[in-house]
Image (tube, rainbow, N blue to C red):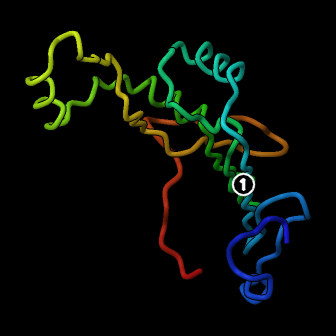
Amino acid sequence: MANWEGASESDLKTAGAELLPTGRCGLRLKGWHIESTKRHILGSLARQEFEEKLGTSHLPERVFGDSSLFILHLETDIKLHFNAFDALKGWIQEALPPVEVPAAAKWKFRSKPSQQCILDYDYTFTTPYCGSETLEPETNRTIPKDDCCGLHWEECDE
């Protein structure tokens, strides 16, 4: 059943969906190809590569750098892809100041300066990232972007 952990195979067939071949996690449904990859947390070498490419030594404690989700519209070849590296790239570009929460301010007031850990980056890793857009097979070129996604959701009957 291709590692599908959701609906049963008969429910998927009733909905008009077909699972991807064994070894792949996802399905095809009404002109869409949806697939995910689940990988391990980055090892130290891969993590160091992320840090070098992003120009920072501040990454989340655990980064699932090789896990991803992609959604491909088969008729238009538009692919929306979600991955950790691009999300972290958005965090770097956003360059938000450190987050101050009220409880931290109270703690800072009560603690000694030597006990305080001052972070000079946004440790919440807030990002404007809303997916990476590309045109798939033949053209393989990136769709021009403004501040965020060029795609927008529209209501439909399906």
Q: Residue 128: give x, y in percent of width and height.
A: 42, 38
Q: Residue 54: give x, y in percent of width and height.
A: 56, 18
Which quadrant would residue 147 be assigned to in this image? top left
Residue type at mark 1 is Ser
Which quadrant would residue 45 be assigned to in this image? top right
Q: Nearer the viewer, residue 22 or 127?
A: 22
Q: Residue 30: give x, y in percent of width and height.
A: 73, 74
Looking at the picture, does residue 158 appear above or below residue 153?
A: below
Looking at the picture, does residue 153 appear above or below residue 119?
A: below
Q: Residue 135: give x, y in percent of width and height.
A: 72, 44
Looking at the picture, does residue 47 appear above or below residue 55?
A: below
Q: Nearer the viewer, residue 67 or 43?
A: 43
The residue drawn where x is 61% and y is 12% is 52
Q: Is residue 123 left or right of residue 115?
A: right
The residue drawn where x is 51% and y is 25% is 59
Badge 1 is on which residue? 36
Label 1 packing within 10 angstroms: few (<14), some (14-19), many (20+)? some
The residue drawn where x is 51% and y is 15% is 57
Q: Quadrant of the N terminus?
A: bottom right
Q: Is residue 32 left or right of residue 122?
A: right
- What secondary structure is marked by label 1? strand
Looking at the picture, does residue 153 appear above or below residue 151?
A: below
Q: Is residue 81 left or right of residue 153?
A: right
